[in-house]
Image: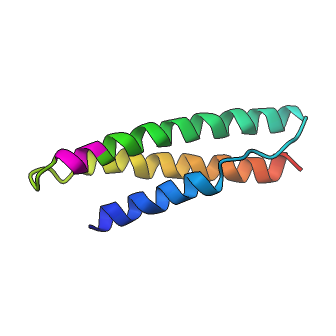
Amino acid sequence: MKQVKRLAVVILSLAASASVMAGSSSDCKDAKDKYRSAKSELEYDVRRYFNCVESSGGQDECDSEFRHVKNDQDEFESAVSDIRNDCD
């Protein structure tokens, strides 16, 4: 249940940050590219984690899939920070 709550937080985080700020510098472009990549990876691994939870039948803790989501969230947070810093 704890992992499902974390999954909900990740999904809400993705929804809240769906728009990328405008900016024209090279650093901003790089930050946007990093953001899109991190978002894509996170979305993919959230789906994998959700599918594991749905099909586990109480037999699989889905810890490997959740570890990917946690790592992706770190990258996503870093990308959001880069946009805040580089795209004013």
Above-or-below relation of 9 to 56? below
Residue drawn 32% across the image and 48% down it: 50
From the viewer's perspective, tell me whether residue 13 is left or right of residue 43.
right
Looking at the image, can residue 65 be seen? Answer: no
Residue range in magenta is 51-55
Query: Colour scheme used in the picture?
Result: rainbow
Residue 36 magenta-drawn? no
Q: Nearer the viewer, residue 78 or 15?
A: 15
Residue drawn 40% across the image and 45% down it: 46
Which secondary structure class fits the magenta region best? helix
Q: Position of residue 21 (x, y in %)?
A: 80, 46
Above-or-below relation of 41 to 15? above
Q: How many marks?
A: 0
Q: Position of residue 17 (x, y in %)?
A: 65, 53
Residue drawn 72% across the image and 47% down it: 19
Q: Position of residue 9 (x, y in %)?
A: 47, 62
Residue drawn 85% across the image and 42% down it: 22
- The answer to which image quadrant residue 1 occupies is bottom left
Residue 54 magenta-drawn? yes
From the viewer's perspective, tell me whether residue 17 is left or right of residue 56.
right
- The answer to which image quadrant residue 48 occupies is top left
